[in-house]
Structures are given as structure tokens and as C-alpha cells.
Image: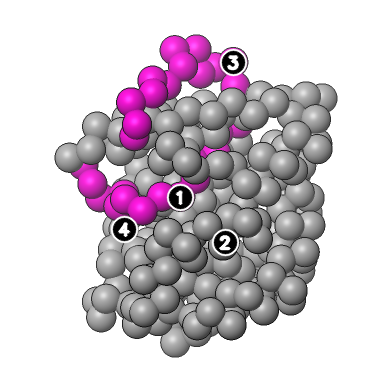
Amino acid sequence: MSRKILCVLHQVHSTTGQVGVALRQLGHQVHIIRPLVGQRIPRQVDRFDGLIVFGGPMSANDDHLQGIRTELYLIERWMHRDRPIWGICLGAQLMTRVLGAVVYKHPNEQVEVGWYPIDPVGRGKRILTPLTHVYQWHREGFELPSGASRLAYGVVGGLFREQAYLVGQNALATQFHPEMQPKMMNRWLMRAGHMLELSGSMNINNHRCGITRYYLKQSGWLKRTLDRWVSFKLLSA
């Protein structure tokens, strides 16, 4: 059954990456909006079956940005409808704020940029299998909201403890970027390569070698998980 998925992006040049590819391969329709560049949220959001909020360079705490306030309101409305929602990086942090938990910068100004191992726990052992390493690109992290089920810890030096959680059966939050594609990674490295100089970031070899070691596993996992997510079957994974 074809479903309509509303995808929230945050910059003019941003794309849905591998998420959009997988959704279309599964037969679903992808509708893109960019509230932070002035695009309005569709009035009839009820016509969409799922919502995915992607990442971006801004902070989930940037309440001075109208687009951030708009997205917080959209996420809150959506979660009351009990329909599938997936927050990716910034999207996960916005979900976290809606659920009443804190989004924060690392106290030592460290970041996660590159491929990092994760440690699935509880339901995450089913939902996140076979992921061992995931692609990260963020300065901020989040605390686990009350009532959420932790799916994974970060395991490198404890820079950002919370990496994924689930609320109910269909509200998924991932700190990492499953939408990443090789071309997307190269674009990020070109436009924001200075991030590799920050404390906690992985070197360029980690980025390049991770494509060979982990990308196909991550993209295969993504397609299977999107199929289960949109069908309310995450917990039967």
C-alpha cells in the first residue's frame, strides 16, 4: 500500500538522501517542505501517513528562529495523532524537546563527526540489528525523554550517551544519519570540513573507509526499517 510521507528539511540544498530513495523503492510518495527557508507546512497534514524530520546545522534550542518554533509545533501535533514519526539528528533533538527532555552541547565542546560504534540495548537489539557503526554529524545531544524506550548507547568515550529511542510503537529518534549517501558525505566534508578539526571528530580515513565497511549495511537496514516503521511493525522486527 502506497503511503504519503512528509519530509522536513532545513536548508535549500538539503535532500532526503537514502531515506527518499528507500521510500520510493517501497512504493511510497515523498513530499518535502523546508520551514526554515520560509515554506509553509501543508494545512491538511492529516493526508500524510508519516513524518520524517531530518538534520541541519542549526540548534533545536534556536527558539529565535520561526522555523524551529513551527517544527516543534508540527511535531507536537503529529505525536498526538499517533502516526509514524522519525526524527534524525536535529529532528530527534526537536522530538526530545517536545517530549520535555533536554538538548545540550557537550560540556567539553566535543562533537561526533564520522563513523562511530553504537551499543543497542533492550528493544534496540531487534530494531537496530545488524548495525554496529553509524554515521554521525552533530554538536549537540539529547537526554532520554520520560516514557521513551532507550534503543542504543554511544560507546566511544561516552561523548553522547543517548543514540536512539522509541516512544510507543512508531515514534523513532536516531542521533545518527541513516539517510547519508557517499555523495552526501562528500558534500558535507567539502562544505563543513572544518568540523573534522573539532575535538571528538573522526579523521578523514574514518569517513572514507566507513563507506566500504558500513554503508551497505546501514542502507539495507534503513530500507527494512522504513518498511516496518510506516506499517506500525517496528516492534515485530
Closer to viewer: mark 1 or mark 2: 2
Q: Are marks 3 and 1 in contact (CB under 8 Å)?
A: no
Provide the major secondary structure of the magenta segment: loop
Measure how far apart labels 1 and 2 are at the Cα level.
13 Å
Measure how far apart labels 4 and 1 are at the Cα level.
14 Å
How packed is label 3: few (under 14 Cα within 10 Å), some, or many (20 or more)?
few
The quarter in which the N terminus is drawn is top right
Residue 103 image label? 4
How packed is label 1: few (under 14 Cα within 10 Å), some, or many (20 or more)?
many
Measure how far apart labels 2 and 4 are at the Cα level.
25 Å
Which residue is depicted at the point 34% across and 34% down?
A: 36
Give whichever of 219, 168 is nearer the camera: 219
Kind of residue at disc 4: Val
Identify the residue position indicated by label 3 in the image. 47
Answer whether residue 45 is magenta in the image.
yes
Closer to viewer: mark 4 or mark 1: 1
Residue 28 in view in this figure: yes
Total number of numbered discs in the rendering: 4
Mark 2 element type: helix
Q: Is residue 2 above or below residue 137?
A: above
Q: Is residue 132 above or below residue 15?
A: below
Write the start and end of the magenta stretch as one range: 36-63
How packed is label 4: few (under 14 Cα within 10 Å), some, or many (20 or more)?
many
Which residue is depicted at the point 33% across and 26% down?
A: 38
Left or right: where does residue 55 sit relative to residue 231? Answer: left
The quarter in which the C terminus is drawn is bottom right
Where is residue 64 drawn, in percent x and y?
17, 40
Identify the residue position indicated by label 2 in the image. 185
Measure how far apart labels 3 and 1 are at the Cα level.
24 Å
Identify the residue position indicated by label 1 in the image. 55
| Most distant residue in the top direction | 44
Q: Which circle's residue, 1 or 2, is located before the other in the chain? A: 1
